[in-house]
Image: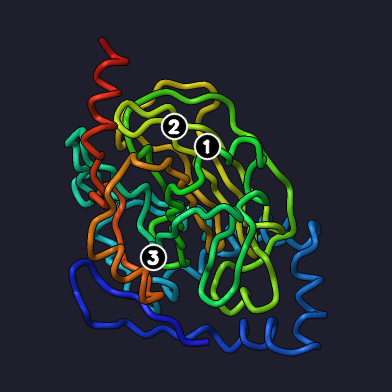
Amino acid sequence: MIYYSRQRNSKDNIITESSKTLNFLYGCFLGRLILKIFTRKFFSNLMALYMNSKLSRHRIKRFIDKNNINKYEYELKKYKSYNEFFTRKVIQTKRPINARKSILISPCDSKLMVYNINEDLTLKIKDAYYSIDSLVEKRILEDYIDGYALVFRLTTDNYHRYCYVDSGSKGINYHINGVLHTVQPISLKKYNFFKTNGREYTILNTNNFGKIIEVEVGALGIGRIVNHHEVHTFKKGEEKGYFEFGGSTIVLLVKKNTIVIDEDILENSKEGIETIVKYGEGIAKAKTITRIINKIKNI
């Protein structure tokens, strides 16, 4: 399958095609039979064991070359396993955080699509629809109708650590088990990955954007979500967690009349095109009314 993305404030499309392996696994009956084996828990555990072992180190150089990774953006060290390299830390100055209080930042390096939350509580991802209430409890989602769902799709070449989008506080993380599937668009023809993938969600009580629900979704392979905190007071740009090996997705649910999405991201999303965003960069602004209400609450 071919899909499209754009750099910020550009009209030039970047065309990416799914791998032959994914086309086989999701595109024919035999492939889907094999996929059932790949998505079993024992296979995930076996893959994790390998990716965390010294045996996987030989994959690092090949991965860097294939994906044109600029290794000088990351901490220089000798990695003990492929997964240690996959969860590598970036040099902080390479991912500057937009510190302005009125700016909502991207939690990660990814491809971003934005959707309006309608009364049916569904997300449209490419040409398939997914029920938002399969992400979190329906009673919680009622307050987010007519708000925004921001879907950040991380691919294997992305930096796989993610941060808090504003300062504030949070409660516990709610973990939901699921079958692991790839989040690449080829899978969306056959599978509802939000409904079947392992995921965690939490409610962020932010200082400038009200209550935001953040959902992390695992993926085919290890697909493990590592969140650093349960109940916690956080700062904007502070690392929230990371994904181990496998493409992954983050979803932010934001209430109505809270933010104004940057125009280029909105226009791209209307065309069904993802926008390439970076960890810590601004993607939306707080609406004036939201800022006034939050200031009153903090008095």
The amino acid beneath tag 3 is Lys
The secondary element bearing badge 3 is classed as strand
59 or 38: nearer the viewer: 38
Decide: marks 1, 3 in contact (CB < 8 A)?
no
For this view, does 187 lie left or right of residue 276? right
Q: Residue at horizontal 38%, vertical 26%?
A: 234
The amino acid beneath tag 1 is Asp
Q: Decide if residue 80 is in sight here.
A: no
Extreme residue toward the front, this view: 119
- Mark 2 or mark 1: name the one nearer the start of the chain: 1
Please name the residue that numbered disc 3 is placed on.
111
Q: Which mark is residue 143?
A: 1
- Mark 2 or mark 3: name the one nearer the start of the chain: 3
The relative height of residue 180 versus residue 169 in the rendered view (above or below) is below
226 or 197: nearer the viewer: 197
Q: Which mark is residue 211?
A: 2
